Image (cartoon, rainbow, N blue to C red):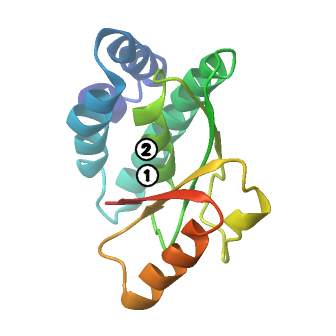
Amino acid sequence: MLQRLKEGKIESLRQLIYDAGRESPRPELVTEVLRPLRSQVSANVPAIMTLREILDGIIIAYTSFCLEGDKKAPGDNYLITGWHLTDACEIWLEALKRTGQGHRIDILPSPPATLAPEILPDRKWLLVTTGKLSAARQKQVERWQQVVSLEIVAL
């Protein structure tokens, strides 16, 4: 996949990712293929950054495709977003991991400056964050959990 990305064979890379998504469980696709692939194009060099954005676009498109398929089936309603997260593609990767499991997932595609999960209390919330929660953030989570179903995904 990395070679195809570096050669600019975007359509071929897209097809490889879609094929891999059909052949292996999506949680494994994310942890064993997509995250390692993204880490190989993470240098702060314009050409590498461009390749990563291309890869992220393919990941987002594939995740959207999977999410749309899930909306037709019965299941729990989820909202996924980032919270104190610098890499917005991680939201999409976490959503992809959960596709095909009986959830109807909507995404807030970039971490909002402030968050108010209580405005949609009928949804289950997944907040993707980086690292361990500070005491203040943990208290905020506990307040939210009093009014909504909320889970933290710490990367």
Q: Please, is residue 143 above or below residue 49 in the view? A: below
**Rendered view: 15 above or below 32:** above
Q: Position of residue 98 (x, y in %)?
A: 44, 33
Binning the other alpha carbons within 10 Å of mark 1 as few (below 14), some (14 to 19) or many (20 upward) gives: many
Asked if residue 17 is positioned above or below residue 152 in the image, the reply reads above
Classed neighbour count for the residue bearing mark 2: other residues with Cα under 10 Å, few (<14), some (14–19), many (≥20): many
- Residue drawn where x is 48% and y is 18% of the image: 11
Q: Position of residue 130 (x, y in %)?
A: 36, 68
Q: Position of residue 103 (x, y in %)?
A: 56, 29
Tag shown at residue 94: 2
Pick the front one: 102 or 146: 146
At x 31% / y 46%, what residue is drawn?
Answer: 38
Query: Which residue reaches farthest front?
Result: 146
Q: Amino acid at mark 1?
A: Glu
- Which residue shows up at 61% across the image and 25% down it? 75
Q: Residue 13 appears in which quarter of the rendering?
A: top left
Q: Nearer the viewer, residue 46 or 145?
A: 145
In front of the other: 151 or 2: 151
x and y percentages locating residue 108 in the rendered image: 66, 53
Q: Quadrant of the C terminus?
A: bottom left
Task: Give the residue furthest to the bottom.
Answer: 136
Residue at disc 1, secondary structure: helix
Q: Is residue 143 positioned above or below 119 on the image?
A: below
Q: Are marks 2 and 1 in contact (CB under 8 Å)?
A: yes
Q: Amino acid at mark 2?
A: Glu
Q: On the rendered structure, is 82 left or right of 116?
A: left
Q: What residue is shown with label 1?
A: 90
Can you say which quadrant of the picture contains the N terminus?
A: top left
